[in-house]
Amino acid sequence: MIHPDWQRLEPYLKHYGQSCLSYSVLQTGMHYYLEEGIGFIAYLPFRHPILAPLGRKIILADPICASEQAQGLLQRFIAIHKRVIVLQCSAFIGQVLEKLGYEVNHFGQETELPIPFDLAGKERSKLRQWRNKCEREGVSVEERAISAGDAGEIAALSQAWIQEKGGKELTLLTRPFVNADEPDVRCFWARQQGKLVGLAIFDPMYAQGKIIGYYHNFDRITADAPNGTSVFIILEAMRQFEAEGVQKVSLGLMPLYVLRKHFRHNEFTMKGLKYAYRKLNHLYPFQGNISHKKKFNGLRQPVYFSSTQGNRLWEMFILMKAMRMI
């Protein structure tokens, strides 16, 4: 399936789309502010009668452009739209936003795994245990296009997974599942005795027209799959990526993990986010997500959010509603 805006976005995405969320700008509902020859900003227009009656434009990740063009592109976008939230941006864009006079709060860490990926050492012992367990229990992983899979089998797997997670699928920070082939997206399937027990999707990360990495955007694992099946799929995918010369795999965001004061920020909101990490795991499994990703002992980079209306907790409620967390 080709995104309706693919033709005009592709040149910029393939040249500058090196963030783990760069491909996620193609998800349904996104709009694009594009300046020819420079790049584009992907954003979700969001309005709510109580939380945001005047609306917000929620920018997903960094602008897709050269770094020297980012400040001007953001300034021109904000001049048009005024009420803007930037979600999961890099430290570089955080510096730009602080320079423009906005609060910038730490939002968590992104985790990257370098390729080749060494499983030796105490820190990654759990990964070895899970890999060995899956191999002993007859789990096999293969790469196949979505179109080559059984539609009913995929639907049943997805439905069971969503029900187990509370009956809703988040959006924005996780690109929703697309049951169709997409350019450069990789799909790996795990089977045990012929039964589908897991499915993982990897989105491309680009630089200067080449794929430099993949983002493990999401997976679907059955309740009766052997423990560690998700990890086993990632490790097997990385073996394939290494053979192709790919540099890294991103596990994406560790939300609200080890929040620090890196920029001029809203202190009350930072305390609120720390409380959410400790006490609101019924809304989102912050601690489970982070515990899982820490076992990879990967490289971590801080990411941020910023609102032109100030980083009040109210802006976080708007984001949570837009992401379907509440």
Image: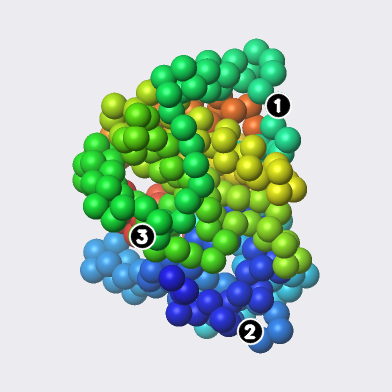
Q: Which residue is mark 2?
A: 35
SS for callout 3: loop
**Residue 118 got which mark?**
1
Q: Residue furthest top?
A: 122
Q: Which residue is mark 3?
A: 179
Q: Give me the residue at 56% from left, 81% from top.
A: 7
Coordinates of residue 312 in the picture (x, y in percent): 44, 53
- Mark closest to the chain's N terminus, 2 or 1: 2
- Residue 69's place in the image compared with 326, above or below, is below
Name which residue type carries label 3.
Answer: Asn
Q: Give me the residue at 34% from left, 35% from top.
A: 194
Name which residue type carries label 2.
Answer: Glu
Does 326 sit left or right of 117 as displayed?
Answer: left
State how far apart marks 3 and 2 are (Cα): 31 Å
Coordinates of residue 292 in the picture (x, y in percent): 48, 28
SS for callout 2: strand
State how far apart marks 2 and 1 are (Cα): 42 Å
- Mark closest to the chain's N terminus, 3 or 2: 2
Name which residue type carries label 1.
Answer: Asp
Residue 300 shows in the view: no
